[in-house]
Image (cartoon, rainbow, N blue to C red):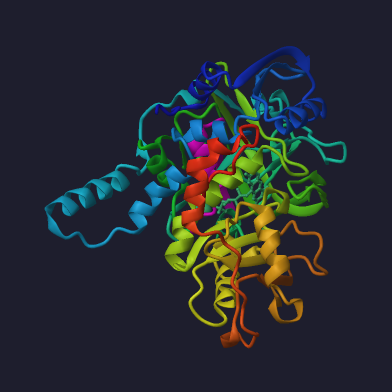
Amino acid sequence: MRIAHDLREWVALLEREGELVRVAAEVDPRLEVTEIVDRVVKAGGPALLFESPKGATQPLLVNQFGTERRMCLAFGVRTLDEIADRVGEILEMQPPEGLAAKVRGLRTLKSIADSRPRTVKRGACQEIVLTGDDVDLGRLPVQTAWPGDGGPFITLPAVITRDPRNGNRNVGMYRMQVLGPRTTAMHWQLHKDGRADYLFGEGRMEVAVAIGLDPVSAYSASAPLPKHIDEFMVAGFLRGEPIDMVKGVTVDLEVPAHAEIVLEGHIERGETADEGPFGDHTGFYTPVEQFPVFNVSAITMRKDAIYPSIVVGKPPQEDAWLGKATERIFLPAVRMTVPEIVDYDLPVAGAFHNLCIVSIKKAFPGHARKVMNAIWGLGMLSLTKGIVVVDAHVDVHDYAQVMFYVGANVDPKRDVVISEGPLDHLDHAPTLQFFGGKIGVDATAKGPAEGTREWPPEIEMDATIRELVDRRWDEYGLDRVQPAPPD
Ligand SMILES: Cc1cc2nc3c(=O)[nH]c(=O)nc-3n(C[C@H](O)[C@H](O)[C@H](O)COP(=O)(O)O)c2cc1C
Ligand SMILES: [Mn+2]
């Protein structure tokens, strides 16, 4: 399947697929767009291109990621698990035996080597260059999404920094509140790589922000990768083609040549400002906090640049699908560290960090607890507040099934673990910010080895009888009854 190389190709692809509607009417990026998008997202509706956002010179694209189908179109796959399979192939690479395996191995290694971003001389993103007094963020259709928001926020930026210790690039999606024509806040949460780059440096730090990328690169900025991994390298691997980068006009950083809009500038260590409130993906407003100030020295753009945005709020919203992509794409990496994990699900309604359902191949007493502790120690999953562990045969994506086993298999006194540890920056429930309680529920089958009575067998029909009934179904005259699909 063809994938889009830049945002306008992506818009064209969505349009061809009947996945985009243009809105010609003048619409206000302050609140009005949110109310429209909220209704469209919840109805599983199309991406929206607002052609005349009030007070702005650029069109505004929202809801580009809002359904599973669009997410799959973005990656050129039929299911998100297909992407995971490609990632898994690399992670599970063994020393090759025999010529065929060697050739296959070399091909895989080559595809990784070919994924590294490439430097090019010229980029469409610099067709228009605005510096000095010409820099005016007020001309972009930046949304003020919710009535209590502290101002307009840029919500889909790919923020590019360098680790001052080794020059490694980091790309992260961190919202930016517009504070003035040439300044924004930089919402680097406590546990994020961008903040680490900032804290490792002293004085002035250069920052570039790419807005309006091809969907795979935009997704990659939101992916929770280890600090030393360049998100644009991963984007290149997932696209099957490297990202072309061009040197910034006023900063010594490279930016994706195909970006619609680039903000270049710097952050001065210690210069902070009030950020927020912001109606967040938790479904609540995050309060005002101090965050670093980004000073914009240049805006560069393509001609007819499209400005993309995303609305977050009470789930489900568009970001649910960015989160689901991460859940699927990272399964092989999770299983690499904790191989007994069969599958996991981060419910959208749990805002991703509140709840993780995980199924395991249980092999020894206390195994569910071992897995809970592994998750509480694993990358960004370590911030998970609640974990439910079920046995391998349980479908973690079927919440009714999970609820059945939580109800049936749990003695709350024995099977509930209360622990504590680091929590998400945005979690308002714990007494202290960043640190508090965790809950683990062991809903696996137990037995005398874990100090319980003999565990009863689960009810199951014989396979032969199932086959018999499948075969004879038409004879029963039950055509109006839809038989449940066999497992
Ligand atoms: C739409 C959207 C908005 C986000 N906003 C923020 C944000 O404001 N601050 C933040 O720290 N993380 C935010 N994130 C999550 C980060 O993008 C994510 O944790 C990513 O891994 C950060 O990159 P890093 O691992 O290189 O720090 C957002 C994610 C999405 C999908
Ligand atoms: Mn990173």
Question: In this view of the protein, which residue sits in the foreground, 183 or 196?
Answer: 196
The residue stretch that appears in magenta: 204-226
Asked if residue 257 is positioned above or below residue 356 in the image, the reply reads above
Taking the image as shown, residue 466 lies to the left or right of residue 348, namely: left
In this rendering, would 421 be left or right of 146?
Answer: left
* Residue at the top extreme, as displayed: 24
Asked which quadrant contains residue 70, the reply is top right
Count of number-bearing discs: 0
Residue 214 visible, this orientation: no
Q: Is residue 255 above or below residue 186?
A: above
Q: Please provide percent x and percent y for residue 227.
A: 49, 58
At x 56%, y 30%, the residue is 212
Above or below for 80 versus 345:
above
Q: Is residue 413 visible?
A: yes
Vertical side of 38 occupied by 284: above or below = below
Q: Quadrant of residue 209?
A: top right
**Horizontal and vertical percent position of residue 242:** 36, 37
Q: Considering the image in quadrants, where does the N terminus appear?
A: top left
Magenta span has 250? no
Residue placed furthest toward the right: 148
Q: Would you identify the image quadrant in which residue 247 lies?
A: top left
Query: Which residue lies at the image location 58% right of the left edge and 32% below the top edge?
Result: 298
Percent of width and height locating residue 240:
36, 37
In the image, 182 versus 194, the foreground residue is: 194
Residue 223: in magenta span? yes
* Rendering coords of residue 486 (x, y %): 52, 47
